[in-house]
Amino acid sequence: MEKAINRQKVLLHHLRPSSSLPTHDSPLSASACSAGDSAAYQRTSVFGDDVVIVAAYRTALCKSKRGGFKDTHPDDLLAPVLKALIEKTNINPSEVGDIVVGSVLAPGSQRASECRMAAFYAGFPEIVPVRTVNRQCSSGLQAVADVAAAIRAGFYDIGIGAGLESMTVNPMAWEGSVNPKVKMFEQAQNCLLPMGITSENVAHRFGVTREQQDQAAVESHRKAAAATASGRFKDEIIPVSTKVVDPKTGEEKSVTISVDDGIRPNASLADLAKLKPVFKKDGSTTAGNASQVSDGAGAILLMKRSVAMKKGLPILGVFRTFAAVGVDPAIMGIGPAVAIPAAVKAAGLELNDIDLFEINEAFASQFVYCRNKLELDPEKINVNGGAMAIGHPLGATGARCVATLLHEMKRRGKDCRFGVISMCIGTGMGAAAVFERGDVADELCNARKVDNHNLLSKDVL
C-alpha cells in the first residue's frame, strides 16, 4: 500500500498547477487505493484498458485413439466451442478482430486451414481472420496471451484465444532427418529428449519418489471424479455431437460427448504401484502418473472492458499478466517453478496473494517438484483435478485451464480473487498467466472511482 501512495505522490507532484504552491495548500493529495498494492491493477483501473474475459468454454477431453473423439475431425472439435461463444454472448461475430488457435502436432498449413474451416462452421464471416500459434504445451495459453496483447495494443477490441489438438489424428512424431550439428550442442541435443526422460531427470535430480508421484495421480483422479459427479464442469463444457465407429464391425453410431472420459474414480496407490516404468527400466514415470494423451478444444472470448460494459456482458475474469521463460531442456518440467513467480511479480503480487492455481500435470514428477519448490498450498492447486485425470491435448490445454480456472473462481465468489495458470513446455520453457475474478475487479474499480470523486469534492469545497 505504501508503494501505491508513493506513486500517487510522484504523479500529483507533476500535476500541481504551480511549483511555487506550498505542499500543505495543494488541492491534490495522495490516498490509499482500495485496489491494494497491485501495480498491474492500478495501471488498468486508472486508464480503463483492462482486457477481460466474458466467456470461456471447452469440449470434454477424451482419450486419443480410444475415446469419444477418436473418429472426430479436428475442425469439428474446434467449431462447437467457437460457436458457443457467439450463441451464449450474442456478440456479432463480424466484430471479432482475430481468432488465434494454439495447436502443436498437426502440420502448420493444414491445421491453419482446419481452423479457418472451423470458424466458418461456427458462423464467423469471411472478414474475421484466423491464425495458429505453437509454443508446445502452452500454445492454448499463448493464444489467449497473444489476443490480450493485441487488444491492449489497440489492434482490435474483441478477439478469441483458442486451443485445439487431436492426438488421435496427429500423434507425436518427428518427421524428416535431424541436423547432425545438434550433437555439438548439449542443450540443443536435450531438446530432442523424450518428454518422459525429462520427467525421469526431474525425479532423479530433485528426489521426487515414485510414491509421491503415484499419490499425486490418485489425488488428481479423485478430485476430477468429484468435480464431474457434482457437475462443476457443466458450465465450461460444450457438448459435441459426433460419431463413433466400432473398430470391429465398422458400425457408426451418433453420440453426444459432454464428459471427460479419462477419469478413473477408483484409482488407488495399490493399482498404480503395479504399473511398470515406461521410459527407464529403473525409473518412476508410468502411464498412471503422467498426463493422458487426449483430444479436445477450448475457446476464450476477450475484449476491452469498455466494450464488454457497453454490450452488457458479465465479466468472467480479467487478464492481468503473462510470462514465458526458458529453462534447461533436460529438466523442462521445472518451467512452472520459474514462470509462476515471474508472472505474479509482473502483476505486482506475491505468491500468497494467489487463491487458485491450475498447473498442468504433464508428469507427476514435475508437478510435485514445482508445488514443493514454490511451497504452494496443495488445497489451492488443481482443485478439480488435472491432466493426469482429465487429459492433456497439447495445444488445447491452456484454453482448457482458463475455462476451468475462471469458472471455479466464479463459483467461489468473494473468497477467490486471483488465479494463476502455468505449464512446462517441451524443449525447456515454462509459461504462466495471472487472472483476476471479474466482479472483484469491478467492485474495486467502482470503489476507486467513488474514493476519487469524494476526494475531489472535498478538496473543491
Image (spheres, helix red, strand yellow):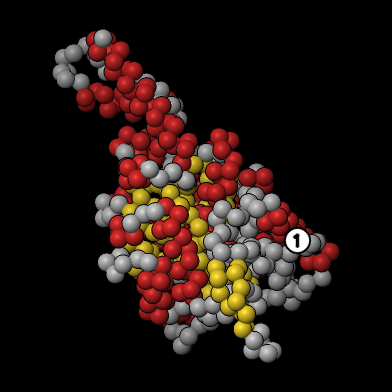
Q: Which residue of the protein is positioned furthest toward the right in this rendering?
A: 270
Coordinates of residue 391 in the picture (x, y in percent): 62, 66
Q: Which residue of the protein is positioned furthest toward the bottom in this rendering?
A: 249
Residue visible at 38% across and 27% down?
448
- In what element is the residue under mark 1? loop
Residue 179 in sight here: yes
Coordinates of residue 393 in the picture (x, y in percent): 55, 68
Coordinates of residue 155 in the picture (x, y in percent): 26, 55
- Residue 86 located left or right of residue 371: left
Q: Is residue 428 above or below residue 381?
A: below
Residue visible at 56% across and 53% down?
235
Foreground residue, 361 or 189? 361
Number of marks drawn: 1
Amino acid identity at mark 1: Pro
Residue visible at 42% across and 52% down?
89
Q: Quadrant of the N terminus?
A: top left
Instruction: Please tell me in which quadrant of the rendered image residue 86 appears.
Output: bottom left
Q: Is residue 91 above or below residue 419?
A: below
Q: Which residue is mark 1?
A: 265
